Amino acid sequence: MLRRILIGIGVIVGIFLLFKFCDFKKNDDEDITYNTNLIQQQILNVGKLVVTEGHFSEVITYKNQQKYLLDMLSFEKKALVVVNADVTVAYDLHKMKYDIDEKNKTITIVSIPKEEIKISPDIQFYDVEQSKLNPFTGDDYNKINKSVKANLAKKIEKSSLKTNAQNRLISELSKILILTNTMGWKLQYEGKVIESEKDFGQKIKL
């Protein structure tokens, strides 16, 4: 009789522990799902267009000469070209790719989109000199436009515009880092665990 009672108690305790284990497992799964959804939502919030704007100006002189009769006769055309350009450097974080490893509580940023540089020049011509034998044509304007954009691209590289854009990008990505740290998850990028904004900066500015 006592033996049956002990067996019965053992069965009841076993069932109780089994239910407790299942309930713990359920709560653990719920926590992981909740955390995953929260992280995905935060990444969606970060996923926007990060834009840095700048303004550049330059003045160039365009010249072209047409020669005839063994270079004894020439007709020149020239113009003073004033350029004012609005430039944007943008990162479209909607295009960022990432992977969520729920088991190891790790977020891996697979790829960050490259910057998109847009140059919008306003070109004005002054002191235009030309002749009927050497007039300005569409080809001249195309050459000037191409030269202007090439010069502006060099100025952009030497300016702080791209650096400022990268800093804004790092600031946005760091929001993901703060969330993962708070929740006890890890953030990785290019095989390295990201622990600070500095780590992001070293990777992005390589």
Image (spheres, grey):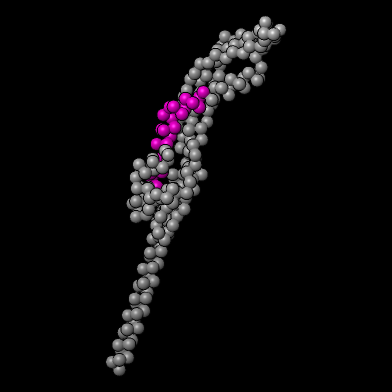
Residue 175, by quadrant, is top left
User: Where 162 falls versus 172 (above or below)?
Assistant: above
180 or 158: which is nearer to us? 158
91 or 31: which is nearer to us? 91
User: What is the span of residues highlighted in magenta in the rendered image?
Assistant: 151-176
In the rendered image, residue 18, in percent from the top left (x then y), is placed at 37, 76
Secondary structure that dominates the magenta span: helix
Furthest-top residue in this view: 72
In the rendered image, residue 115, in percent from the top left (x then y), is placed at 49, 37
In the rendered image, residue 190, in percent from the top left (x then y), is placed at 44, 48
Residue lying at 34% horizontally and 77% vertically, measured from the top left: 16
Query: Residue 125, can we see it?
Result: no
Furthest-bottom residue in this view: 1
Residue lying at 33% horizontally and 51% vertically, measured from the top left: 182
Is 139 situated left or right of 205 in this image?
Answer: right
Residue lying at 57% horizontally and 9% vertically, measured from the top left: 127
Q: Is residue 16 magenta?
A: no
